[in-house]
Image (cartoon, coloured by chain):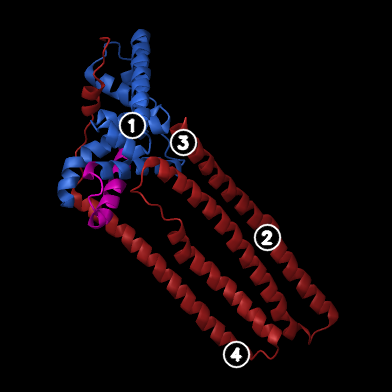
Amino acid sequence: MSNTIDFKALWNREETSAPDVRQIFARANKLNRNSRRKIMVCNILLILTIIFYAFMWWYFHPQLITTKIGWTLMIGAMVMYVISNYQLYPLLIKADMETDSHAFLLQMIRIKHKQEFIDNMIIKLYFLMLGGGLGLYYIEYLKRGTLLLQLSIYCVTLALLALNWFYMQERKTRKQHKAINDVINKLEEVNRQLLD
Amino acid sequence: MVFEDIYRDYWNKVFRICMGYVNDTDVAKDIAQETFINIWKQLPNFRNESAIGTWIFRIASNNCLRQIERQNRMPKTELPEQIEDKHEPDKEWQTKLLYKCIAELPETDRIIISLELEDVKQAEIAKITGLSESNVRVRIYRIKEKLTLKFKQHEQHN
């Protein structure tokens, strides 16, 4: 091997035939179809939720304001979850690919922090609204029963919510948190390469 | 500018940059395709504020950096056995060794040297990476030194 290696000549030896340009269009169209499908799923879920809400209201004729507030809170939690997941979230985490590497890395770090914050906030708000709503909703129907029945139903509901929150949700959040943090650390490390 | 012309002129350039980053043909093709999808979508908004090449290479570099998000797609830096065992280095072996060595560099160095080897001007590399031109020059010099050293080490081992 000579002392001066012609890296450029070696570099240019690596070639591959370009796939048919129609493949690119097909893939781009598939991506578009997928995002359109997501929006459609979101709209269908929202419509179904509203129909369900209207039906329950009409069927049970809630009398107390607590029932109405509770019911609205529970439906609100579902609507918020669907909208944030299918519509708001993709918009907030969209990256500008046309900027320089340094700005891109900073942007990715910001997006990841935002993603972490939204994940945490939405899930906390969801549980708070669902739990609070459920508690208020029960008042009207449980006041006809004995104190023991009331206490048992509240305890079981609370236990189920707590199990979901402290065990399943916490575990899931911890895993997600770790995955996002690993990516943030790696992005920061790569960004530091540009600053050194 | 027609997309089909850009695709024809830049496919191999973009592919090589992706190859330098991941050293895996299938993953490199995949990133190159993603890059061209971005180009196709954004082309109507391209305002000639920078050279078309700079714009394309920015998108390609950022798509490479985006692989950080996809942890399961880490660069494969192992050379196939039949190539590693070869004692008489030929051009093909050297080419594979070059891509292997580049994929072992820190992420941003991979992009810088790939652009340099793709004959992109240092001023353009500075615009693509967000570094100053003098910083790019120094880095290219150091990376080339590192690559030469790695090549020589391999030569001694074989």
Q: Residues within 10 Å of mark 3 (few under 14, many from 20)?
A: some
Task: Report the mark closest to the observer, 3 or 1.
Answer: 1
Task: Respond whether the residues carrying marks 1 and 2 are from the same subunit.
Answer: no
Task: Report the mark closest to the observer, 1 or 4.
Answer: 1
Amino acid beneath label 4: Tyr
Q: Secondary structure at mark 1?
A: helix
Range covered by the magenta-colored residues: B25-53
Q: Which residue is mark 1?
A: B133
The chain letter under disc 3 is A
Q: Which residue is mark 2?
A: A165
Q: Secondary structure at mark 4?
A: helix
CA–CA distance between discs 2 and 4? 31 Å
Task: Name the residue rendered at 52%, 43% in the picture.
Answer: A184
Chain in blue? Answer: B
Q: Which residue is mark 3?
A: A190
> Of label 2 and label 3, which has the lower sequence position?
2
Task: Respond whether the residues carrying marks 3 and 1 are from the same subunit.
Answer: no
The chain letter under disc 4 is A
Question: Left of B36 or right of it: where is A183?
Answer: right
